[in-house]
Amino acid sequence: MIEAPDLSLSALTPLLFVFGAALVGVLVESFAPRHVRQPTQVALALVGTVGAFGSTLLVAGDDGTVTGAGALAVDGAGHFLQATIAGLGALSILLFAERGLDPAKSAFVASAAVPAGSPRDRELLTDERVQTEVYPLATFAVGGMMLFVAANDLLVMFIALEVLSLPLYLICGLARRRRLLSQEAAVKYFLLGAFASAFFLYGLALVYGATGSIRLSEIRQSVTDDGTGTLLVLGLGLLVVGLMFKASVAPFHTWTPDVYQGAPTPVTAFMAACTKVAAFGAILRLLYVAFGTADWTWRPLVYGIAIVSMVVGAVLGLTQTDVKRMLAYSSIAHAGFLLTGVIGLGGGTGSGLSATLFYLLAYGLTTIGAFAVVTLVRDGDGEATHLSQWAGLARRSPLTAGVMTFLLLALAGIPLTSGFTGKFAVFRAAIEVGAWPLAVVALVTSAVAGFFYLRLVVLMYFSEPAEDGPSVGVPGLPTTIVLAVTVAATLVLGVVPGSVLDLADRAATLVG
C-alpha cells in the first residue's frame, strides 16, 4: 500500500505562493480580455514573488526540515537563498513592467510568432501590445529556482533545473528590438542548456549506479561507508558540469556574453541575478550535503575552475565594447570569486557558507541595478549599449552617470560598497582553510577587472559626448523603485553590513 508522504505546509508556503501565482497567470492569459492582462499579470507576479519573500521570512526561524518524503530540505541556507531569489525576482518583475522608456511601451515584442524582419514585424514594432506571457513564465522560473536551492534529491534537482530553464529559453527571444539577435540568443541558450542538462542527467544516472540512491543524504552515507569509486567520481564530475553551466562559470560560460547581449535587458538582469543565486545554491547543496565527506574528490576541480573563471572573466572583459557583454564577463569573473567562498566552506557550515550567501545577495542587487541603468540610455533603435555611446553621459544626465558609477564601483569591490564587503568575506573564508593562493589570484583578477569598470566611468565623465549621442530616458515608477532599492541596499551593505552578515551567519546550515 502506497502512503502519501508527510508534507510541511509551512516549509512549502513560499513555493506555493510562487507556483500558485504562475498557474493563475496561465489562466489569466487564456481567458482574460487582452486589455486587462498587463496590469493583472504584473499584479499576480508581484503577489507571488513578494508573498514568497514574506512567507520565507516568517518561517526562517524554524529548524531545518526535510519534507516531501525526503525530497526537499528547507534549512537556514535554503531560507536565505529562497528569500534572496524571491526578492530579486520581484525587482526583475518591476523591470519587466516598465512602460515609460520605449515608445512602444514595452521592451517585449507584441507578437512572438511573427517572423523577425517581416513587414508585419515592422508594423508591430510600434504597437503598444505586449507579450504578457512573460510574467507567468518568469514566475515559473522563480519557482523553479526556489525549488532548485531546496532540492534534497537529484531527480527533484533536475526537474527544478528544467522548470527554471525552459521559461528563460523562451523569454530570451522576446525582445521587441533587434529581434534576430534576441532569437539567436534564445537558440544558443536552448541548445547549450540542453547539453548541460544532458550532462547533469547522465551524472545523476552514474551516481545512482554507484550508490543505489539519488537522495543526497543517502549518497553521503554511501560515500562515508564505501568510499568513492571511478563511477561515482565520473558522475560527480558530470553533475558539476551541468551546474557550472547554469552558474556562468568558465570554461562553461560560452553562452553567457551572447545571451546577455541578445536577451531583453530586463530578462538579462533577471538571469544575471536570480539564476546565479539558484545555481550556486544547488552547487553548495550538492557538494556539501552529498559529497562533503569526500571533498578531496572535488576541491581540486573547483579550485581550478575558480581560477579559470576569474582569469577569463577579467581578461576577456577588457576587450569588450558593449556594456551588456562587459557585464556578462563581469558575471563570469564574479562566479570565480563566489567559488572561493565555496572552497572556504568547512563541513557545510562556517564562514565560507555565510560569506557565499552574503555575496550572492550583494551581487544580485548590484547587478539588477546596473542593468536597470542600461535600460535608460537609448538611441533611435532602442538601448544604446556600445561603449562609445556612453561617452560624456555625465553631461547629459549627471544622476544616471552617478548611479552607474556607484554600481560599477560596487562590482569592482571598492570600499563602502557591498562588493567590497562580499569580496572581503569570501577571500577571508578561503584564507582560513589554507587556500591563500586562490585568494591572491582573486585579488589580482579583481584589480584587472577594475580596469574595465573604471574605463566606463572615465568615458562617462571625461570624454566629449557625440552630437548625435543617445538620450537618457526618464524612468517610470517601476524602474525608479528598482534603482532606489538596489542603490540603497548596495550602500547599506557596504557601510553597515553587520546585521546582514549576522543573518547570513545564522543561516549558514545545510541539512539533508
Image: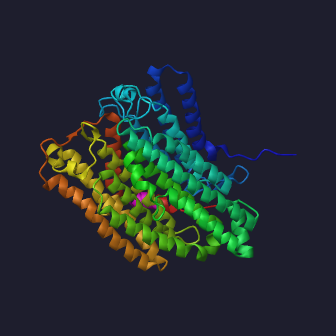
Q: Is residue 104 above or below residue 159?
A: above
Displayed quadrant of residue 232? bottom right
Q: Where residue 268 appears, x then y in whole percent?
A: 40, 47
Q: Residue at x 47, y 55 (%)?
A: 276
- Provide the residue span drawn in magenta: 497-502
* Dominant secondary-structure state across the stretch colored magenta: helix
Displayed quadrant of residue 485? top left
Q: Residue at x 30, y 69 (%)?
A: 448
Q: Where residue 6 appears, x then y in whole percent?
A: 74, 47
Q: Is residue 501 magenta?
A: yes
In the displayed image of the protein, which residue is found farthest to the front?
Answer: 118
In terms of depth relative to the viewer, which is nearer, 30 or 142?
A: 30
In terms of depth relative to the viewer, which is nearer, 462 or 80?
A: 462
How is the model colour-coded? rainbow
Q: Residue at x 35, y 72 (%)?
A: 443
Displayed quadrant of residue 349? bottom right
Q: Is residue 487 magenta?
A: no
Q: Residue at x 73, y 68 (%)?
A: 210
In terms of depth relative to the viewer, which is nearer, 260 or 353?
A: 260
Tell me if residue 154 can be seen.
yes
Q: Where residue 452 appears, x then y in whole percent?
A: 27, 61
420 displayed left or right of 302: left
Quadrant where the C terminus lies? bottom right
Q: Where residue 272 appears, x then y in whole percent?
A: 42, 52
Q: Is residue 190 above or below residue 430?
A: above
Tell me if residue 61 can be seen.
no
